[in-house]
Image: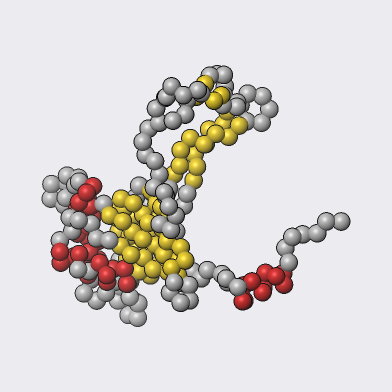
Amino acid sequence: MSKSHFNLDNFLTQVRTGAGLSRTNRFEVIIAPPAGLPQIRRNSADLVSLYVDSASFPTFNLAINAFKIFGPAYQRPITSDYGGEGMPITFNVDREMKIKSFFDDWCHLVVDPVTFTVGYPKEYASTINIRQLDEQNNINYELELIEAFPRSLSTMELSNSSQNQTHRLTVTFAYRYWKNVTLKNAVPNTTVPTPTNRTANPVIGNPRNTTIFYT
């Protein structure tokens, strides 16, 4: 009779004496201020990164289409989604409210509060680096959000009954995609593929029995 590959003793030994497990509280977030932010706010960028309370690594999904000829359908990937519609990061807020003012001004770069016109991405879009650390503060894993900007700021409740609590601000960031900066050639190819004169390869399960050209 076959046995499971899992061995509890080997697992415990690996965790205790080997690489161990990643800890959720060992992380840092580096937020680069956008180019259009006033210098007085750009000087607060280090403080903003220092006051991060919680963050998360973003999602990744493949969009697929099902092609059915006969029997079970073929699953064909058509594009990728990096979860860029929104990712929340929560910040502790300092007494002078520099954290809140930093993101207020950043949001006003995206949409002007007087004219309500939308700004240029080169002025308001920036990068955010999320790092997984070990107990010695070594960076074991790092993602970079590309073309990131704040899309919403949470409410900050004021209450006389909350005398021993401090403010937290949750900022939801939109971005185009993310990349693992520890990998080479991690930037996705955003060019639209075009047909070539090379010999085409037929695709299995192509419902119209046509030929697809690859670049």
Residue sitting farthest toward the left: 114
Q: Position of residue 116 (x, y in %)?
A: 17, 46
Residue 152 horizontal side relative to residue 57, left or right: left
**Location of residue 106 with respect to 11 vertically, above or below:** above
131, 159: nearer the viewer: 131
Name the residue at 13% across, 46% down: 115
Residue sitting farthest toward the right: 1
Marker count (numbered): 0
Name the residue at 18% across, 58% down: 37
**Location of residue 153 with respect to 135 vertically, above or below:** above
166, 158: nearer the viewer: 166
Residue 148 horizontal side relative to residue 120, left or right: right
Residue 164 horizontal side relative to residue 124, left or right: right
Query: From where the camera sits, is residue 168 visible?
Result: no
Residue 90: image quadrant is bottom left
Name the residue at 19% across, 68% down: 43
Q: Position of residue 187 (x, y in %)?
A: 39, 47
Residue 205 horizontal side relative to residue 187, left or right: right
Residue sitting farthest toward the front: 198
Q: Position of residue 65 (x, y in %)?
A: 53, 33
**What colouring does the structure picture have?**
secondary structure
Residue sitting farthest toward the bottom: 164
Q: Position of residue 141 (x, y in %)?
A: 46, 63
**Location of residue 39 with respect to 13 vertically, above or below:** above
Query: From where the camera sits, is residue 166 visible?
Result: yes
Residue 152: image quadrant is bottom left
- Which part of the image, by quadrant, shows the N terminus? bottom right
**Location of residue 191 with respect to 2 vertically, above or below:** above
Name the residue at 42% across, 24% down: 196
- Which part of the image, by quadrant, shows the C terminus? top left
14, 121: nearer the viewer: 14
183, 133: nearer the viewer: 183
